[in-house]
Every structure is written in C-alpha cells, then in structure tokens.
Image (cartoon, grey):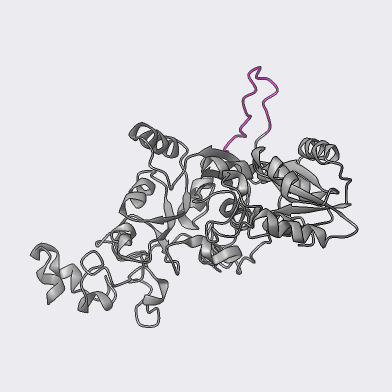
C-alpha cells in the first residue's frame, strides 16, 4: 500500500491493524504527508463501527495506545458527576505561623483521583488571541469553565490591550501579558514556558490558530489536556500530534464569526459526559467596581452629562489602538461627518462622544456642529463599560461598545 511504503517496516503492523487506527488511514496517507486530509474533525470518526476499546481522542498521539483498558475497574468513586470545590481546612490556632490543620487521616492529594479518573480540572490557562473585542467575547467561555468545573482556577495569557478586559471579570485569578500573535524574544518565550510548567495546569485552552510551532509551545507546558484552534489549511500539519483536542474554524480569521466566534470550543466544553448533562452557554456579563464607577462618573459629569440622560457614541474613525474594534471588521469605524448627522438626529438626550486619543478632541469640536455634545476620553474597556452602564443607550459600530452594552443590558 502507498501509506505503508513510506514508513519503516518495523511499525507497519500498527498501520494495518484496524482497531488501532480508523479505516480512513488504510487508504490515504498520514496527515503530514497529505495536507488535504483532515483527521482532526470529530465527524471523521465512526463510533457505530469501531468498538469503544479502539476509540481514542487522537490516533497520532501514541500509536501504541489502544484506548482504555476494558478490564480496569475504578469502582464508584469519582466516576461520574461534577467535581467538588476544594474545602480549605481550618487554620491551626496553636501554630503562630498560620499553617493549616489537617485532620487525622486526611488525604491532601484526594483531588488527584478525580483528575485521573473523571478528568477533573483544578487549574486552567486560557491563551486568547486578539485585542479587547476578542477577549470580551471569551468571557462566556470562562463562565462555562466555572460552571462545568466547580472550584477551578482560571488564568489568562493575553495581549497588553486584551489584559485590560479582566478588571471586568471576577472569575480570573491571574492575567499575564503574553501576546500569542506576537514574535517574542527567545528569553521571553522560554520564561513563559517555565511559568506555565510551574503552575501545573490540567487544561490549556488557546484561541490562536495553531500550527506546529504554537502546538509545540502548548506541549512544552506539560499540561494534561491541550486544546486549541488550528489552521483550516496546510499550516495545521503536525499540530494534531501535540494537541489533545483541536477545532477547525471556517476561515483563518476567527473574529469573522462575531459573537459566536468560539462556538466550537463552547460546544466541546459543555458536552454531556460522566452523567453530567449538556452545560448551557452563559450570556456575556461584566462586573464593575465601585471605584471604577466613581472615576468614570467624574469624567462624564465634567463633560456636562448626567447619569441616565446621555447617549454614548463610539466608533469614530481613528488610528488609535484604543478604538476596540473587531479584527473581523477592520473598516467598521465611521468618519466624523457621518457621526455629525447621527448626533443631529438625537433628541431628548445628550450625545457623548468617546475619543480614543486626546488628539481627536479638536477634530470632534471642529466637525460636529451640535454644541450640546460631550466629549469623554476613554482608553480602557473598564472605563467604557462604566460609561455605558450609566447611560441611556449606545450608538456604535462593530466595536467593544456593542458587546459591553449587551453585557449591561443597555439599548443599542
């Protein structure tokens, strides 16, 4: 056969054994020889034909792995259901250093049994590609992780702009600046691998389209499960060797999916398993601190606006990175001449223009003829969310303002 002739004869029996590999591998070349063949989609499997003993997540991870041992008996402990939150033992009152008091016979590693048998997740790292818009839309994924795995600790790796979003999310423990789309120096690259290894993650999620390079980065983190989107073309060759689960988007720009850009990852995380029903997709929600609200209130009052009596206008044309537009809609910003006509049509409320840079203030004052307007300089998604929260509504293009208005249930 054509496929076996390209491989050493010493492993040829493993390629001709039907229980080890699906039947598609017997007539076609492996994926790294035939890029057009997609072996990563779940739909290529045929559960009705293969026995459960032969099925496994990725046949290329280990050719000697024939699946779970059918004779293995775990009993009834940690077999099904959701994981429980870790209960913290009481402090030892007799210890001046505040060490915990572990009861007699208490097994401090009892959580590891659930990790092995049921696939519990105690620590998770999320690597989010993109800016503010893409990180905001990842909030439902984080909420689903908290609902599906009670007691989970969620950390985030994002760009410098994307990290600003997580002052709005109380479910995230740590947020580190590391742009998956960038080209880091070798010292930063290896340092981040060390950080990931030292945190002992059970699960790593990535929204960056992975090739062999990014898959290698995730593999070196030593996490148990490594889940990522992959390129829908030949650039994905080799990534499935190093990843536990992969998702193939419709295009190379994941942001073109809009609000449902992460639907494949949400569907996989919420899948029914271990007698746990399908987890519903939570809505997008953000939380605001009192200090942030007070800071933004002082800003819009200085612009002459009152709480609940102004309309937020967001999406003026600018070259600033603080525009918070979607990567899937790069021409969504409108010139000030168009916003001038929109502001003239507003009655009963004060139009408040959000500028991403102070250099835009003079342009707004010069082009917008309506004198009854307010101008507020906003650069972070937290300030924008607080401004929208006190407004009567939002008029915006395809920017983060639309998603924040949706999260705070404001008219848009």
Q: Main secondary structure of the magenta part?
A: loop
Quadrant of the frame with the C terminus:
bottom right
Q: Residue at x 21, y 79 (%)?
A: 27
Report x, y in % for residue 164: 61, 41
Of residue 143 and residue 372, the one placed in the foreground of this image is 372
Quadrant of the frame with the N terminus:
bottom left
* 76 over 104 or under it: above or below: below
Report x, y in % for residue 25: 24, 74
Magenta stretch contains residue 56: no
* 307 over 96 or under it: above or below: below
* 373 over 7 or under it: above or below: above
Q: Quadrant of residue 185?
A: top left
Q: Is residue 138 left or right of residue 70?
A: right
In the image, the segment drawn in magenta is 90-108
Q: Residue at x 27, y 74 (%)?
A: 19
Report x, y in % for residue 188: 39, 33
The answer to whether one can see residue 161 in this image is yes
Of residue 341 and residue 153, the one placed in the foreground of this image is 341
Magenta stretch contains residue 92: yes
Report x, y in % for residue 89: 65, 35
């Amino acid at each position: 056969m054509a496929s076996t002739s390209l491989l050493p004869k010493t492993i040829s029996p493993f390629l001709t054994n039907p229980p080890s590999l699906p039947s598609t591998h017997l007539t076609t070349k492996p994926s790294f020889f035939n890029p057009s063949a997609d072996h990563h989609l779940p739909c290529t499997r045929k559960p009705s034909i293969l026995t459960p003993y032969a099925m496994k997540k990725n046949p290329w991870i280990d050719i000697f792995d024939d699946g779970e041992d059918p004779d293995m008996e775990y009993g009834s402990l940690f077999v099904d259901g959701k994981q429980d939150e870790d209960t913290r033992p009481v402090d030892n009152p007799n210890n001046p250093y505040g060490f915990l008091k572990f009861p007699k016979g208490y097994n401090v590693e009892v959580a590891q049994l659930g990790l092995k048998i049921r696939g519990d997740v105690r620590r998770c790292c999320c690597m989010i590609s993109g800016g503010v818009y893409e990180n905001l839309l990842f909030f439902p994924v984080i909420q689903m992780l908290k609902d599906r795995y009670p007691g989970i600790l969620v950390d985030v790796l994002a760009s410098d702009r994307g990290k600003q979003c997580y002052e709005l999310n109380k479910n995230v423990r740590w947020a580190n600046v590391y742009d998956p789309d960038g080209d880091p120096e070798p010292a930063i690259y290896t340092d981040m691998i060390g950080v990931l290894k030292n945190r002992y993650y059970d699960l790593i999620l990535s929204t960056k389209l992975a090739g062999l390079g990014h898959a290698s980065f995730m593999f070196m983190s030593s996490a148990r499960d490594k889940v990522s989107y992959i390129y829908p073309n030949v650039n994905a060759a080799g990534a499935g060797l190093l990843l536990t689960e992969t998702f193939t988007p419709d295009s190379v720009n994941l942001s073109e999916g809009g609000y449902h850009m992460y639907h494949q990852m949400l569907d996989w995380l919420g899948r029914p398993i271990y007698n746990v029903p399908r987890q519903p997709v939570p809505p997008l929600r953000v939380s605001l601190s009192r200090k942030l609200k007070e800071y933004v209130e002082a800003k819009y009052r200085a612009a002459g606006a009152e709480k609940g009596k102004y309309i937020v206008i967001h999406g003026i044309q600018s070259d600033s990175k603080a525009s918070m537009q979607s990567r899937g809609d790069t021409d969504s910003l409108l010139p000030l001449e168009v916003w001038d006509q929109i502001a003239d049509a507003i009655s009963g409320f004060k139009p408040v223009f959000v500028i991403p840079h102070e250099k835009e203030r003079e342009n707004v004052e010069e082009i917008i003829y309506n004198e009854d307007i307010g101008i507020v300089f906003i650069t972070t998604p937290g300030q924008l969310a607080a401004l929208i929260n006190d407004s009567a509504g939002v008029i915006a293009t395809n920017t983060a303002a639309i998603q924040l208005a949706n999260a705070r249930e404001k008219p848009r």
